[in-house]
Image (tube, rainbow, N blue to C red):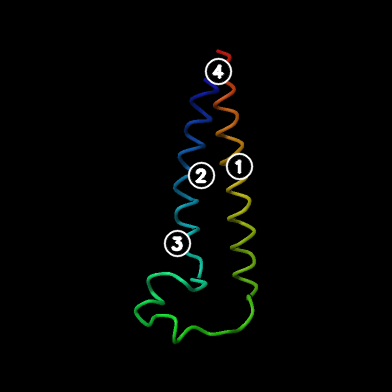
Amino acid sequence: MLSTILTILLVICSVLMILLVLLHKGRGGGLSDMFGGGISSSLGGSSVAERNLDRFTIGVGIIWFACVIALGLLLAYQ
């Protein structure tokens, strides 16, 4: 029962993590800069929305990591 709940939580966190990472603004050095996408990027500081997105991404990442560790321990000692 607990392993099923952790597996479902892990899948939800994984999908959410993918979406959150895709929402982040590019920082440069990627394929978009190679083809001129970095020319129009602003050099301003982080906005409040970006900082909150960073915090939310870190929080989901910690939950994802905890689920992976908990599932590993649960399946190892079952």
Task: Say whether marks 3 and 1 touch (CB < 8 Å).
Answer: no
In this view, the mark in front (3 or 2): 3
Q: Which of 34 and 72 is in front in this view?
A: 34
Q: Residue 76 carries which label?
A: 4
In this figure, which residue is indicated by the disc labeled 3?
22
Spatial CA span between label 3 and label 2: 14 Å
Tags 3 and 2 in contact by the CB under 8 Å rule?
Answer: no
Q: Which of marks 1 and 2 is nearer the N terminus?
A: 2
**Mark 2 and mark 4 in contact (Cβ < 8 Å)?**
no
Q: How far apart are marks 4 and 3 (CA)?
A: 33 Å
CA–CA distance in space, label 4 to label 2 = 22 Å
Quadrant location of the C terminus in the rendered image: top right
Residue at the disc numbered 1 = 63
Q: Residues within 10 Å of mark 4 (few under 14, many from 20)?
A: few
Q: Mark 1 and 2 residues: CB-CB less than 8 Å, in contact?
A: yes
Label 1 to label 2: alpha-carbon separation: 7 Å
From the top left corner, tell me how far across and down residue 77 is, in percent: 58, 14
Query: Which kind of residue does numbered mark 3 sit on?
Result: Leu
Spatial CA distance of label 1 from label 4 is 20 Å
Q: Is mark 2 on a helix, strand or loop?
A: helix
Task: Tell me the kind of residue under disc 1.
Answer: Ile
Q: Where is residue 24 in the image (x, y as percent from the top left)?
A: 51, 66
Q: Distance between the residues labelled 3 and 1?
A: 18 Å
Which residue matches tag 2?
13
Q: Report which quarter residue 36 is drawn in.
A: bottom left
